[in-house]
Image (cartoon, coloured by chain):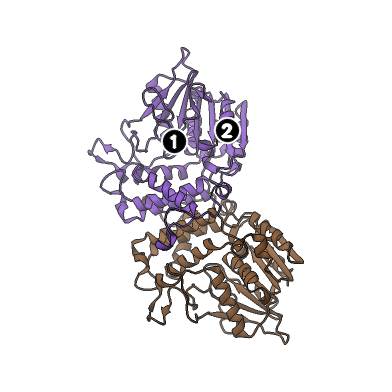
Chain colours: A purple, B brown
């Protein structure tokens, strides 16, 4: 992997709502690893967004009051420049010639987007999961650019358990013969088997054992008679994972996945000062909110507590919300009854 | 997969210690998915066994006082009949022609072994993980054959979270082109990539996030300069998993792994009576001990509690030990300071 620079990358973004006269009502959302910039439906695109229940008129992040900006991450494949894009210099797809990507790079692309939009300082930067790490990096490295931070089911650093899981997901993709060292013919296609396996492991780690016990128990699938498929799908939980994995394949580029996954492993806020405390000293936040879920074992609650405690030294108004959602890491996408009021309380 | 019968299977076993005159001091150990029958060193084989610290003269399972029997599971590949064995009728390796395997079959092979050894009734049957499920099946289905049961880091049924993980491990193996629908040329070889991935996922789930945070943190590996291997090994945790996976490949037959893994998913004690309570009514135990570990997320502590509670209705003396070991599911193999006294208290 080479270190290097990308000349004037493209950042795909969507906006909802309007900037007010004082230009102080903008909210920037950084996404998790896989979403697009389409956070919610709008007049320009009426299809449902990935956080439809959270963002919109009269919703917790109220587009009647705020200008909401959501960007597709640098390094992703939904309009922003990434390993699946054409390198304008060589006129070839970057693939593994894309330089090492960090969440700090994604944060910097967010700052450049604000320059482009003529916004000096955000009301708040928000992110969940990888997006929460990016939002934290933004708050430290572009400190004057935001007055507020909401970090959801995220962390100040990746720990070895989640690094191990992501490393294994990447290995599943890399060891698929169709990966071809990143040179599969059509970006977005290629190592379907590796992507399927990686997605299934993702699904397993994004939810919780409790949820699945309640939802699926030991129910057998009725779709296919198990006896016809040696070691095939037998239990409902297996059918559920299979259905989700199928949807994922073909929609996300494998090389982009590898770069973004690795960027999460590499993230450690402490790199910006020597310790977490010294790093957090950089922020110029007026308010911060840290939200975590007890059943999240990918970004465990003790990491949310660590971040909230760390912020308290330097930020006057820090709220910490510990939610008892059952859906693990993905709760912010599905447990709207708990997440809506928590986030509404910030706005 | 066909249902069927295996004619007079071979069961490989080892014994340590001597049967007393009353023939009531025998202890039978069922293993987890991967071990051999070599539980501890003996005069016949001086090499260290997989539970060396637990079994031997003056150890918690004291071979000066007990006859200890350990069998390689039916369906495994270390001497016992399994998918890697030659079918005496066709004179070919069974591979996927081996019939569906259940833990109840492994329990029955243990009862047959006792017949062979002339032992009517055990002092205790013991098992950890898959072996604990097998020991429970033995206690229910061959109830007159044992006075005691020790179940360690096990459960009365597989739940969807662990089924999902094992299903994914099997899929990693099955989707390796070298698996060849089970027809790889040499038993014990074949889908090395799939086995490597499955082993890594196993290692991740056998330990705990807390342990790895303490042991590895975010330490970088010093073995290989990361820049030379795109998406290769960078962190210590990745080097650790790689080293363990390499050791596993070539030592365990892939088809055997698939059969034993599936047998765990299929196990549900409730199948023997309609409910767990009705199933446990079958036991004729005088004493039982259930040991679990709080950091075990593969066989969570609430499953140990459920089993201990269930046994209390039908067994006079039931002990439940909740250990705060840091090493997760594998604690019984490594946290000897906590496990030795717990198991010694039973004997």
Question: In this picture, is B106 found above or below B113?
Answer: above
Question: In this picture, is A126 found above or below B195?
Answer: above
Question: In this picture, is A64 found above or below B267?
Answer: above
Which residue is more in the foreground, B298 or A1? B298
User: Which of disc 2 and disc 1 is earlier in sequence?
Assistant: 1
User: Which residue does the image show at 74% across and 62% down from the upper left?
Assistant: B313
Q: Is residue B305 left or right of residue B226?
A: right
Q: Is residue A256 left or right of residue A200?
A: left
Label 1 vs label 2: CA separation? 32 Å
Tell me the element at label 2. Answer: helix
Q: Position of residue B228 (x, y in %)?
A: 36, 52
Q: Position of residue A253 (x, y in %)?
A: 34, 43
The reply to whether residue A253 is visible in this rendering is: yes
Circle 1 is placed at which residue position? Answer: A104
The reply to whether callout 1 and callout 2 are in contact (CB within 8 Å) is: no
Q: Position of residue B179 (x, y in %)?
A: 36, 65
User: Which residue does the image show at 56% across and 82% down from the upper left?
Assistant: B45
Locate residue B287: give its quadrant: bottom right
Residue extending farthest top? A21
Q: Is residue A169 left or right of residue B104?
A: left
How many numbered marks are there?
A: 2
The reply to whether residue B231 is visible in this rendering is: no
Residue extending farthest bottom? B21
User: Which residue does the image show at 43% across and 77% down from the upper left?
Assistant: B85
The chain ID associated with circle 1 is A
Q: Quadrant of the N terminus of chain B?
A: bottom left
Graded by Cα atoms within 10 Å as few (under 14), some (14 to 19) or many (20 or more), the crowding at tag 1 reads many
Mark carried by residue A337: 2
The chain ID associated with circle 2 is A
Which circle, 1 or 2, is nearer the viewer? 2
Tell me the element at label 1. Answer: helix
Which residue is more in the foreground, B218 or A183? A183
């Amino acid at each position: 992997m080479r270190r290097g620079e990308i000349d004037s990358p493209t950042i795909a973004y969507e906006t909802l709502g309007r900037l007010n006269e004082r230009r102080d009502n903008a909210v920037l959302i950084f996404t998790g690893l896989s979403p697009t910039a389409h956070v919610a439906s709008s007049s320009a695109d009426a299809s449902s967004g990935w956080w439809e229940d959270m963002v919109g008129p009269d919703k917790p992040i109220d587009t009647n009051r705020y200008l909401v900006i959501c960007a597709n991450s640098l390094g992703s494949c939904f309009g922003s420049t990434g390993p699946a894009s054409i390198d304008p210099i060589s006129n070839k797809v970057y693939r593994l010639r894309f330089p090492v990507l960090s969440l700090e790079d994604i944060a910097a692309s967010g700052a450049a987007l604000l320059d482009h939009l003529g916004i000096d300082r955000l009301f708040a930067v928000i992110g969940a999961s990888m997006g929460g790490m990016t939002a934290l990096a933004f708050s430290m490295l572009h400190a004057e650019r935001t007055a507020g931070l909401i970090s959801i089911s995220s962390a100040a650093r990746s720990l070895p358990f989640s690094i191990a899981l992501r490393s294994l997901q990447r290995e599943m993709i890399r060891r698929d013969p169709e990966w071809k060292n990143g040179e599969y013919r059509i970006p977005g296609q290629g190592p379907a088997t590796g992507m399927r396996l990686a997605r299934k492991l993702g699904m397993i780690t994004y939810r919780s054992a409790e949820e699945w016990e309640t939802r699926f128990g030991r129910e057998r699938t009725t779709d296919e008679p198990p006896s016809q498929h040696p070691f095939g799908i037998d239990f409902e939980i297996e059918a559920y994972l299979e259905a989700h994995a199928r949807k994922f394949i073909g929609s996300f580029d494998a090389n982009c996945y590898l770069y973004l996954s690795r960027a999460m492993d590499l993230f450690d806020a402490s790199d910006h000062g020597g310790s977490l405390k010294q790093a957090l000293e950089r922020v110029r936040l007026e308010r911060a909110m840290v939200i975590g879920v007890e059943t999240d074992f990918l970004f465990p609650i003790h990491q949310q507590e660590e971040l909230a405690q760390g912020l308290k030294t330097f930020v006057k108004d820090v709220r910490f919300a510990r939610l008892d959602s059952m859906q693990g890491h993905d709760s912010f996408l599905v447990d709207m009854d708990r997440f809506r009021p928590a986030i509404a309380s910030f706005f």
